[in-house]
Amino acid sequence: MLYMLEFPFGFETNTQNINDRKAAIYCPLINNLSPSYSKVVFVNLYMGAIWVISPSCNSLFSLIHELHFDKTSAKRIIMKAMSISV
């Protein structure tokens, strides 16, 4: 299984537009990697300048859950992701 994470930061508030653009950009890479992995997931953790957080950030929660992190580790990962974005 392969998770591809991106932590973009921008000034747009239309997160769906950004998610669609990023998915189109990474689609060829995901298609090329898919035969080598059981699952390839692109996670776009977009955060806007006015603290608009993309709904795709839910993929991070799915990743943490799938990897069986305990609550303390999960909280640390989320806080680290937020600090990287800022």
Image: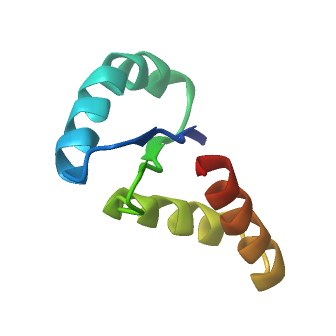
Count of marks overlaid on the render = 0
- Residue 50 location, quadrant: bottom left
Foreground pick, 8 / 1: 8
Vertical position of residue 16 compared to residue 65: above or below: above
**Position in image of residue 28 (x %, y %):** 33, 16
Scheme by which the image is coloured? rainbow
Foreground pick, 74 / 69: 74
The quadrant the N terminus occupies is: top right
**Position in image of residue 85 (x %, y %):** 59, 49
- Residue 22 location, quadrant: top left
Foreground pick, 23 / 51: 51
Q: Residue visible at 62% across and 72% down?
A: 65
Vertical position of residue 68 compared to residue 3: above or below: below
Q: Residue visible at 42% across and 63% down?
A: 51
**Position in image of residue 75 (x %, y %):** 73, 76
Q: Is residue 57 left or right of residue 79?
A: left
Vertical position of residue 18 compared to residue 54: above or below: above
Q: Residue furthest bottom?
A: 71
Q: Residue visible at 25% across and 40% down?
A: 18
Foreground pick, 1 / 63: 63
**Position in image of residue 61 (x %, y %):** 54, 69
Q: Is residue 19 left or right of residue 7?
A: left
Q: Residue visible at 29% across and 34% down?
A: 23
